[in-house]
């Protein structure tokens, strides 16, 4: 995206997000949407829809087209929020991020790697508006959503109980901050469960109610030595230290 297009898109996204009425937007089959359908969809929004449609007409790259495909679903998911609430939300993100809200929102939508994450991002906006999460958590959870591949993100519900996935998603989810280790086993991979932020992402981003309460603390699962083990180890060490004779030479260990 060139700099001029970046500015135009950021302004258009900001105007769209704070528009008076978003309820005229329709949910399209977003699989493989072309430019013409995107233009007609955004044109349904009074006043600002024409601005968005004009920006779409001028774009050339696939990435920019993909941005507006994700944006369309994002806007559809927040259409029932009020302009007043959305404007207040915009003020909050500008105050904490010290940046233009249009650029912030555009960057978030552009960075998500799967269109279904648009729904998660929209849910986080709605739950911030409702007061279920803080503005700081909105940024944290949005960042987590961006970084975690969608194929791993949909496995989050498994971690409502102690769990480990041999396929490798556990390590990635743990590194992203959505899991905490609950069982440390010296002879195994241990077990993991949703962290506090992981619970919030599941409930307020993915729209799933937590089925079980999180246990506090970490369980250490360590093997203890029996009396027989201790005696065996002692005898092995003593055997190594006993003097031995090689030829005519006495060798002390």
Image (cartoon, helix red, strand yellow):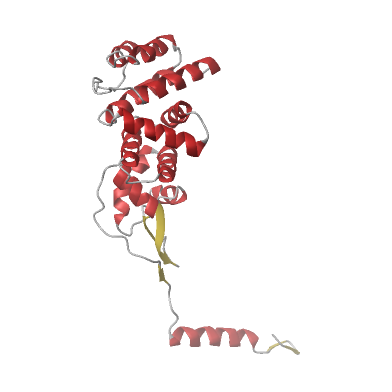
Q: Position of residue 125 (x, y in %)?
A: 35, 36
Q: Position of residue 101 (x, y in %)?
A: 45, 29
Task: Return the residue nearer the eye: 220 or 210.
Answer: 210
**From the viewer's perspective, is residue 191 above or below residue 156?**
below
Task: Return the residue nearer the eye: 244 or 129.
Answer: 129
Q: Position of residue 108 (x, y in %)?
A: 43, 32
Q: Position of residue 167 (x, y in %)?
A: 38, 48
Quadrant in the rendering for residue 47: top left
**From the viewer's perspective, is residue 231 above or below residue 9?**
below
Total marks shown come to 0
Task: Return the residue nearer the eye: 102 or 204.
Answer: 102
The residue shown at (36%, 25%) is: 18
Q: Is residue 114 visible?
A: no
The residue shown at (24%, 49%) is: 209
- 224 sits to left or right of 204: right
Q: Is residue 82 visible?
A: yes
The residue shown at (38%, 34%) is: 88
**From the viewer's perspective, is residue 92 above or below residue 178?**
above
Quadrant in the rendering for residue 117: top left
Quadrant in the rendering for residue 102: top left
Task: Return the residue nearer the eye: 46 or 155.
Answer: 46
- 252 sits to left or right of 183: right
| Quadrant of the rendering where the C terminus is positioned | bottom right
Toward the right, the furthest residue is 249
């Amino acid at each position: 995206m060139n700099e001029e297009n970046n500015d135009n898109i950021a302004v258009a996204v900001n105007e769209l997000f704070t528009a008076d009425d978003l309820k005229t937007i329709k949910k399209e089959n977003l699989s493989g949407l072309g430019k013409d359908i995107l233009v007609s969809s955004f044109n349904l929004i009074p006043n600002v829809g024409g601005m968005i449609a004009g920006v779409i007409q001028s774009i050339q790259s696939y990435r920019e087209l993909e941005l507006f495909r994700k944006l369309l679903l994002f806007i559809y998911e927040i259409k029932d929020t009020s302009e007043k609430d959305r404007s207040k939300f915009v003020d909050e993100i500008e105050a904490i991020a010290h940046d233009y809200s249009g650029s912030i929102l555009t960057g978030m939508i552009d960075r998500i790697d799967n269109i279904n994450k648009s729904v998660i991002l929209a849910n986080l906006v709605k739950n911030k508006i409702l007061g279920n999460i803080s503005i700081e958590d909105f940024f944290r959870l949005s960042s987590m959503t961006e970084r975690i591949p969608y194929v791993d993100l949909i496995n989050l519900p498994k971690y409502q109980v102690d769990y480990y996935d041999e396929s490798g998603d556990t390590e990635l989810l743990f590194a992203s901050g959505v899991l905490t280790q609950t069982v440390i086993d010296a002879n195994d991979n241990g077990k993991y469960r949703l962290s506090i932020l992981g619970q919030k992402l599941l409930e307020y981003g993915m729209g799933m109610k937590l089925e079980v309460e999180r246990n506090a603390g970490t369980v250490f699962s360590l093997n203890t030595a029996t009396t027989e083990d201790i005696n065996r180890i002692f005898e092995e060490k003593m055997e190594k230290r006993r003097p031995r004779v090689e030829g005519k030479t006495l060798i002390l260990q």
